Amino acid sequence: MEKKVSLHVKCPLCGKSLMDNDVILNGKPSVKVNITSENDRGVLHLCSTYGCDLKKMEVEVSEHEVVEFYCPHCNKELSTNEHCNECEAPMVAFVIKAGGEVRICSRNGCLNHHIVFKDVSSELSKFYYEYGF
Ligand SMILES: [Zn+2]
Ligand SMILES: [Zn+2]
């Protein structure tokens, strides 16, 4: 059975929490980022449950358009130099409070995502401990 894990994420650049307690998705605080599309800019709320693609967008984004993600605190871009192995768009990274990074594809409509652990032994055990896998 697949376990639904709600991730608490932070900006990889300034370390501030990206969780928004005012916008609840799937019963959990959402992840808040600013995005810029070709014609618009604004706030995007993502579901914090890992693997869930529920989102709330105040921005006009065409299907399959690649958007830029920015931290709402430091306004720096959250992209990585990794590219999506399904559509080649840049992957965006958030730091998981319990350790590691969650990366999602920046293309609207592409659901590619994964978790990266830099120090597998310690971070994975912390992660397993915190989420009780
Ligand atoms: Zn930041
Ligand atoms: Zn993709």
Image: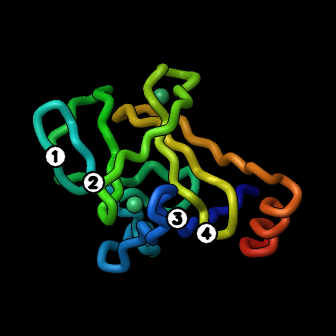
Is residue 123 found left or right of 105 in the rendered image?
right
Give the mark, 2 or 3, whose residue is nearer the N terminus. 3
Is residue 106 found left or right of 42 in the rendered image?
right
Give the mark, 2 or 4, whose residue is nearer the N terminus. 2
- Residue ID for mark 1: 41
Disc 2 + disc 3, Cβ < 8 Å: no
Disc 2 + disc 1, Cβ < 8 Å: yes
Q: What element carries label 4?
A: loop
Q: Which mark is residue 32?
A: none
| Residue 3: quarter of image | bottom right
| Residue 37: quarter of image | top left
Q: Which mark is residue 97?
A: 4
Disc 1 marks a residue whose amino acid type is Arg
Q: Which mark is residue 9?
A: 3
Disc 4 marks a residue whose amino acid type is Lys
* Pointer 3 local density, CA inside 10 Å: few below 14, some 14–19, many at least 20: many
